[in-house]
């Protein structure tokens, strides 16, 4: 098996916590560092003080290279340091503002070389693609520095995550083909958009055409860059069998390998420290809930949460709200619930007043929980550990980090069959702590009813059964430890390096027509 000597990896979420990809990369970093100590380099955009929450600059790292690069490309400021996550990998943050003046030139190059249609670009397309292009320039320079004077060139792999960094694939294929390229789509843009626009993704799945839907949904440029990266990268991957099906149908490109998302267990406290952290979290949650709701929250309150991006349908926020309403009605009519339910809706930008129905309350947390929010001043993990149950009833969820994180912190979780993690978890033994609800295009009410009943059931479980659910949730997470899942990346690197060798051989020895 071919193995890389150096790994470059890039994402918009390197040292920039926005969504689930941050969790993927930041938890995988320790496993990568263990196998390739300080030969793993993460590249991300530099957002100054915001980046410094996650990034610690070290001006001694690669000092000679940085000095040379800065002289040659003074218009692309670069900082080098460590990503403040387990493994502390080297992180290289860059600014790309200077490339705006060359945008049209870059887009013309992308069209001529890779048929990327940038003419319909809008929103975050421009800054994403310019960042990817700039990252490719930095990688090319670092590659030549690290291989200078070496006869036998070491193996380099570059891994781009999502369409936002796809231009780094194009740049390296054109300017530095010695680097093997990998591209991962964590969710196809068209699949997410179909689902988010209220169209039935699953009932008519085989009849959707990605290019046609890109025009209909005004996503021509984003779809184009994602599709061409999938076709041109040396290895194309995605995170679940669910999304692999999407890639084949909507991008006209089967994936080379599925690389499921794992978790890094060092994030989870152990022993007495775990108990202490859980108690602190519950106290903080009850305190804030009491302040928001105007009353004291009892110690035995059932603390429930949902979290993720503000995608009302895709993330199942709508069905969660309906489930809480059904739960309140059930309690009102039968008084079945022994404890008060406090549901924490941890969705950035979803800012609503708290609500209370009988004994079911909702508290909205509209912030990224990075330890600097004005409500808690704690990280998401610092609060997740205090929950009794989590609910993630996704309609569109290629993998589903939130239920996996929940399990890792010993919190029983409810998810669906439309989440990659849900499909995987349903195949595991001893998954008493994970409820996987069958979901499709037409059973919204049944899913909401299922969730309400599951919460009632959990409330009535004997103490020992609740302990069992927590224990088995943690056991499921252990099966998704990166030490088990990183093998898929080794295979992906091997595929990319073999494809690179074939590609370079064809470039050096073109066939006669």
Image (spheres, helix red, strand yellow):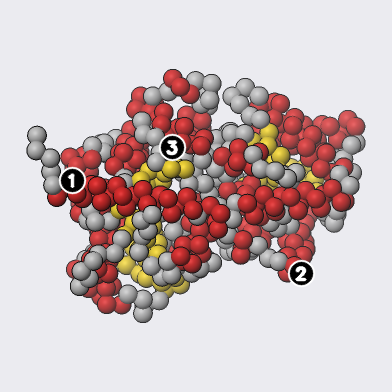
What SS does tag 3 mark? loop
Residue 125 image position (x, y, % from top left): 34, 44
Tell me, yes or no, if residue 392 can be seen here: no
Quadrant for the N terminus, please: bottom left
Q: Is residue 102 visible?
A: yes
User: Neighbour class for label 3 at 10 Å: few (<14), some, many (≥20)?
Assistant: many
> Pointer 3: what residue?
188
Vertical relation: 87 (above or below) 185: below
SS label for mark 1: helix
Within the image, what quadrant is residue 231 found in?
top left
Residue mark closest to the camera, 1 vs 3: 1
Mark 1 vs 3: CB contact within 8 A: no
Q: Earlier in the sequence, mark 1 or mark 3?
A: 3
Say which residue label 2 marks: 272
Q: CA distance from mark 3 to mark 2?
A: 42 Å
- Residue drawn at point x = 76 percent, y = 69 percent: 272
Q: Residues within 10 Å of mark 1 (few under 14, many from 20)?
A: few
Q: With 278 as the anchor, is 306 left or right in this view?
A: left
Could you say which is closer to the camera, residue 124 or residue 114? Answer: 114
Q: CA distance from mark 1 to mark 2?
A: 60 Å
- Position of residue 370 in the picture relative to residue 360 (left or right): left
Proximity of marks 1 and 2: CB atoms separated by less than 8 Å: no
- Give the CA separation, mark 1 to mark 3: 30 Å
Q: Which mark is residue 506?
A: 1
Closer to the chain start, of discs 1 and 2, is 2
| Residue displayed at 31% across by 60% down | 156
Q: Residue furthest bottom?
A: 60
**Residues at circles 3 and 2 in contact by the CB criterion of under 8 Å:** no
| Disc with the residue nearer the chain's start (3 vs 2) | 3
Q: In the structure shown, which secondary structural element does the residue marked by tag 2 occupy?
A: helix
Q: Residue at x 16, y 47 (%)?
A: 507
Give the camera-side residue of 227 and 383: 227
């Amino acid at each position: 098996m071919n193995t890389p000597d150096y790994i470059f990896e890039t994402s918009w979420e390197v040292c920039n916590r926005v969504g689930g990809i941050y969790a993927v990369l930041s938890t995988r970093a320790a496993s990568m560092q263990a196998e390739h100590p300080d030969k793993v380099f993460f590249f991300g955009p530099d957002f100054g003080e915001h980046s410094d929450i996650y990034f610690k600059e070290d001006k001694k790292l690669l000092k000679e290279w940085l000095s040379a690069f800065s002289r040659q490309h003074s218009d692309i400021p670069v900082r080098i340091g460590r990503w403040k996550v387990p493994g502390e990998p080297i992180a290289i943050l860059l600014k790309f503002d200077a490339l705006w003046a060359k945008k049209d030139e870059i887009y013309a190059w992308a069209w001529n070389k890779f048929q990327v249609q940038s003419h319909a670009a809008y929103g975050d397309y421009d800054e994403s693609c310019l960042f990817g292009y700039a990252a490719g320039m930095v990688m090319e320079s670092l590659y030549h520095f690290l291989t200078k004077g070496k006869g036998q060139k070491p193996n380099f792999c570059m891994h781009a995550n999502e369409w936002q960094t796809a231009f780094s694939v194009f740049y390296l294929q054109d300017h530095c083909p010695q680097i093997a390229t990998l591209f991962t789509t964590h969710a196809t843009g068209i699949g997410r958009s179909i689902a988010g626009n209220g169209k039935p993704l699953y009932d008519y799945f085989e009849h959707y055409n990605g290019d046609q839907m890109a025009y209909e949904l005004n996503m021509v440029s984003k779809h184009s860059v994602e599709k061409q990266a999938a076709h041109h990268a040396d290895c194309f991957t995605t995170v679940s069998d669910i999304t692999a099906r999407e890639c084949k149908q909507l991008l006209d490109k089967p994936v080379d390998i599925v690389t499921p998302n794992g978790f890094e267990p060092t994030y989870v406290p152990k022993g007495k420290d775990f108990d202490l952290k859980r108690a602190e979290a519950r106290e903080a949650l009850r305190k804030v809930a009491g302040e928001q709701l105007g009353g004291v929250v009892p110690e035995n309150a059932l603390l429930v949460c949902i979290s993720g991006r503000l995608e009302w349908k895709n993330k199942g926020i709508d069905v969660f709200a309906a489930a809480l309403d059904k739960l309140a009605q059930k309690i009102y009519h039968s008084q079945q619930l022994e404890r008060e339910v406090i549901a924490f809706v941890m969705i950035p930008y979803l800012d609503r007043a708290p609500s209370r129905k009988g004994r079911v309350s909702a508290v909205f947390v509209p912030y990224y929980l990075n330890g600097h929010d004005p409500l808690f001043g704690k990280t998401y993990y610092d609060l997740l550990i205090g929950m009794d149950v989590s609910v993630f009833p996704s309609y569109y969820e290629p993998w589903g980090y939130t239920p996996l994180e929940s399990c890792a912190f010993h919190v029983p979780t409810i998810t669906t069959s439309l989440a990659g993690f849900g499909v995987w978890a349903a195949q595991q033994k001893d998954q008493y702590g994970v409820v996987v609800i069958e979901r499709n295009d037409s059973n919204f009410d049944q899913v909401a009813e299922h969730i309400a009943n599951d919460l009632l059931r959990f409330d009535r479980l004997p103490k020992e059964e609740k302990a069992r659910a927590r224990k088995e949730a943690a056991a499921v997470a252990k099966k998704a430890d990166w030490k088990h899942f990183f093998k898929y990346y080794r295979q992906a690197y091997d595929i990319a390096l073999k494809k690179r060798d074939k590609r370079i051989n064809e470039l050096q020895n073109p066939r006669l027509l």
